[in-house]
Image (spheres, helix red, strand yellow):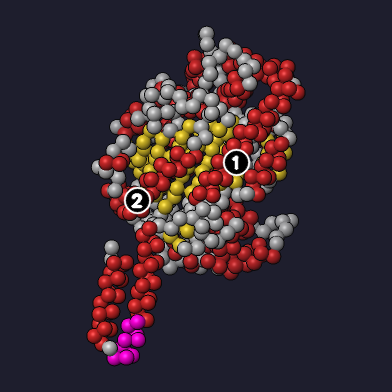
């Protein structure tokens, strides 16, 4: 039997029967890596050493275990249990707790992968709208209402194209 | 109805083998991409009706579309236990996907070779998962296939995306690119060599994982390992592909080097081991799945090292699927209660038929 655990490998020769007693991998473990990682954070075993960062994460979690995500209603306790979040908004809602964990799993919090066409378009449009709104304010201040109305219509059009697909 | 068709779908041209030699250490490649639809709850929280609505919505973009005409749709809730197990064995759909079946759908296209398929999964762990598997080491081809399909959906569906976290997934383990590449490697000698500790450490450091593919009670069965990228965020898709490719080539070299070393240091021992396995496979009347895999692994090694004759050159990955309980039951059209002994004896027969040149 070959035991791989946290980067160290041991080879132990055992018969099948003895190996059963050595089981360290339950089915659940192999199915759900995240649960295992979260488990490490949530269950601070007495003899386990925690770094300051881990301690901070633990503190955040225990303070807010009943906090709920307003979009999907999931709480942190459940996220911990199932190892999955309930919706996109969870990542924002539980930022303080999840981001350090994500950082520790992924090693980064900065996406370097591709950006979807639609999203990049949306980001671009949102920026356009922001610019136009700024312009609109200026036109109103200078009482250039004709131009202001024109800009207002353009903003409306852009907003429609983003939100009412 | 679906159940029966599901099995018929499996390619009849499986005999056509791709690249005779190259599949022997890296047996299989899988590339999988996860996406979620914007402003929808993720699957673990959405209700049955919500899933059905989403399933219908996504199906709309696949049904009757020319590009997808050779895909076939299966609703998981209509599949029996054995068919669902075949999904895992033949199409490498995660076994968890079989639970809570409401609203789950699969579009499957089988390629001409064994272990070649493309699957669009709806309402599995994420709303949409696109997966392509290829025999041997074939990351780039599978990657292209997956992204070709993703680009199509991208034009139809807005995906949940965050500029820092990338594509948002139900599990934080998939954030960012949401791209998972995994290969199954047959490493009978590397697994017992002292090099393996270093090797695992090295992989972990760069964000890759190696696990047993079949894990029994803590032991790895059949010397099969799954190597995959753990990190999905902070690297581009291209980087993940390149790194994975480099790791695989390294694994092949390391295993080959370990084999040569072993053959030189203990030629009699290895020959003895291989012929013992041969003897067991040839004469045993009852073979469990686990034992079969162990023996076939050694025999495969014997073939690779040119140590054994009298047996056919077999595809380890293919035979691994064909001798599973579910495949035996389906292939032999067994019905009613099948005992373990019946299965194990059918398995022993099947292996003999497949690998012995003369019976």
Crowdedness of circle 1 by 10 Å Cα count: few (<14), some, many (20+)?
Answer: some
Horizontal side of B231 relative to B87 (left or right) equals right
| Callout 1–callout 2 Cβ contact below 8 Å | no
Q: Mark number for residue B153?
A: 2
Residue furthest toward the right? B265
Label 1's element? Answer: helix
Q: In the rendering, at what x and y percent does residue B178 appear?
A: 48, 51
- Secondary structure, magenta segment, majority class: helix
Label 2's element? Answer: helix
Q: Mark number for residue B247?
A: 1
Numbered range of the magenta stretch:
A135-143
The residue under the point 44% across, 28% down is B114
User: To which quarter of the image does residue B42 belong?
Assistant: bottom left
Q: In the image shown, does B10 or B251 lie closer to the viewer?
A: B251
The residue under the point 26% across, 87% down is A145
Q: Chain of mark 2?
A: B
Is residue B36 placed above or below B95 in the rendered structure?
Answer: below
Q: In the rendering, at what x and y percent does residue A121 appear?
A: 36, 63
Q: Chain of mark 1?
A: B
């Amino acid at each position: 039997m070959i035991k791989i655990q946290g980067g160290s490998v041991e080879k132990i020769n055992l018969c099948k029967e003895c190996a059963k007693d050595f089981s360290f991998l339950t089915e659940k473990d192999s199915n759900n890596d995240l649960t295992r990682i979260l488990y490490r954070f949530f269950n601070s075993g007495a003899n386990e050493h925690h770094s300051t960062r881990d301690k901070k994460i633990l503190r955040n979690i225990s303070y807010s275990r009943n906090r709920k995500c307003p979009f999907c209603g999931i709480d942190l306790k459940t996220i911990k249990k199932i190892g999955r979040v309930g919706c996109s908004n969870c990542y924002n809602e539980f930022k303080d707790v999840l981001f350090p964990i994500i950082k520790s799993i992924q090693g980064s919090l900065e996406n370097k992968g591709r950006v979807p066409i639609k999203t990049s378009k949306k980001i671009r449009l949102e920026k356009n709208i922001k610019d136009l709104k700024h312009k609109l304010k200026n036109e109103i201040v200078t009482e250039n209402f004709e131009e202001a109305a024109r800009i207002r219509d353009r903003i409306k059009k852009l907003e429609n194209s983003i939100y009412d697909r | 109805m679906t159940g029966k068709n599901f099995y018929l779908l499996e390619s009849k041209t499986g005999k056509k083998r791709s690249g005779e030699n190259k599949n022997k250490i890296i047996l299989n490649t899988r590339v999988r991409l996860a996406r979620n639809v914007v402003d929808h709850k993720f699957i673990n929280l959405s209700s049955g009706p919500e899933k059905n609505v989403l399933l219908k919505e996504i199906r709309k973009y696949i049904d009757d579309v020319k590009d997808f005409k050779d895909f076939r749709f299966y609703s998981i809730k209509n599949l029996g236990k054995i068919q669902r197990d075949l999904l895992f064995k033949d199409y490498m759909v995660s076994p968890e996907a079989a639970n809570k079946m409401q609203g789950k759908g699969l579009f499957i296209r089988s390629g001409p070779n064994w272990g070649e398929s493309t699957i669009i999964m709806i309402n599995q762990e994420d709303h949409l998962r696109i997966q392509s598997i290829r025999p041997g080491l074939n990351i780039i081809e599978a990657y292209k296939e997956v992204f070709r399909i993703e680009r199509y959906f991208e034009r139809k569906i807005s995906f949940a995306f965050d500029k820092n976290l990338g594509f948002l997934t139900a599990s934080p383990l998939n954030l960012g690119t949401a791209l998972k590449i995994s290969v199954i490697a047959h490493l009978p000698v590397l697994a017992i060599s002292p090099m393996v500790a270093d090797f695992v450490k090295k992989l972990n450091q760069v964000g890759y994982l190696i696990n047993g593919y079949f894990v029994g009670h803590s032991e790895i069965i059949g010397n099969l390992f799954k190597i995959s990228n753990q990190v999905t965020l902070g690297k581009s898709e291209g980087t993940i592909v390149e790194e994975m490719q480099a790791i695989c080539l390294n694994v092949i070299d390391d295993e080959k080097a370990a084999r040569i070393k072993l053959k030189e240091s203990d030629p009699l021992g290895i020959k003895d081991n291989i012929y013992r396995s041969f003897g067991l496979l040839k004469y045993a009347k009852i073979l469990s799945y686990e034992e079969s895999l162990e023996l076939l692994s050694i025999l495969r090694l014997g073939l690779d090292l040119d140590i054994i004759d009298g047996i056919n050159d077999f595809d380890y990955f293919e035979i691994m699927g064909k001798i599973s309980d579910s495949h035996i039951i389906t292939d032999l059209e067994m019905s009613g209660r099948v005992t373990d002994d019946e299965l194990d004896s059918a398995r022993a027969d099947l292996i003999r038929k497949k690998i012995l040149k003369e019976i």
